[in-house]
Image: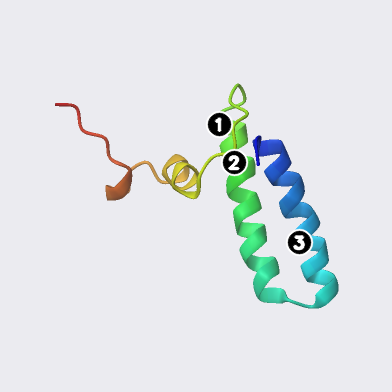
Amino acid sequence: MKTIDEHIEKDRAEIEAARAAGDSGKVRHLEEELKGLEEYKDHHPEDSHDPTALEVYCDLNPEAPECRVYDD
């Protein structure tokens, strides 16, 4: 996907399809992903690119060891 908005819309459609199929595990996974994407979008309104899972995670958990950035 090219933009975060496309990714959000895709996740919403997949959630509805998973609900219709009765796949509660997939629904939970997609709802968590959608929540992270929406929070990322709220934190970065000027940025429309589709963030990676690591970008979303680090935005929500900046103190995590894997998100630390060191300057030389």
Q: Amino acid at mark 1?
A: His
Q: Residue at x 58, y 48 (%)?
A: 36
Q: Quadrant of the N terminus?
A: top right
| SS at badge 1 | helix
Asked which quadrant contains residue 44, the reply is top right
Colouring convention used in this rendered image of the protein: rainbow
Asked which quadrant contains residue 62, the reply is top left
Tell which residue pokes out farthest to the bottom in this image. Answer: 22
| SS at badge 3 | helix
Q: Residue at x 26, y 35 (%)?
A: 69
- The mark found on residue 15 in the picture is 3
Q: Quadrant of the C terminus?
A: top left
How busy is the neighbourhood of tag 2: few (under 14 within 10 Å), some, or many (20 plus)? few
Tell which residue pokes out farthest to the front in this image. Answer: 1
Mark 3 or mark 2: which comes first in sequence?
3
Q: Amino acid at mark 3?
A: Ile
Position of 29 compared to 54: left or right?
Answer: right
Picture mark count: 3
Q: Position of residue 46 (x, y in %)?
A: 60, 21
Asked if the residue under mark 1 is in contact with the one under mark 3, i.e. CB atoms within 8 Å, the reply is no
Asked if the residue under mark 1 is in contact with the one under mark 2, i.e. CB atoms within 8 Å, the reply is yes
Residue annotated with mark 1: 43
Position of 3 compared to 44: left or right?
Answer: right
Position of 66 compared to 10: left or right?
Answer: left
| SS at badge 2 | helix
**CA gap, disc 3 and disc 1:** 23 Å
Q: Is residue 13 above or below residue 69?
A: below
Residue annotated with mark 2: 39
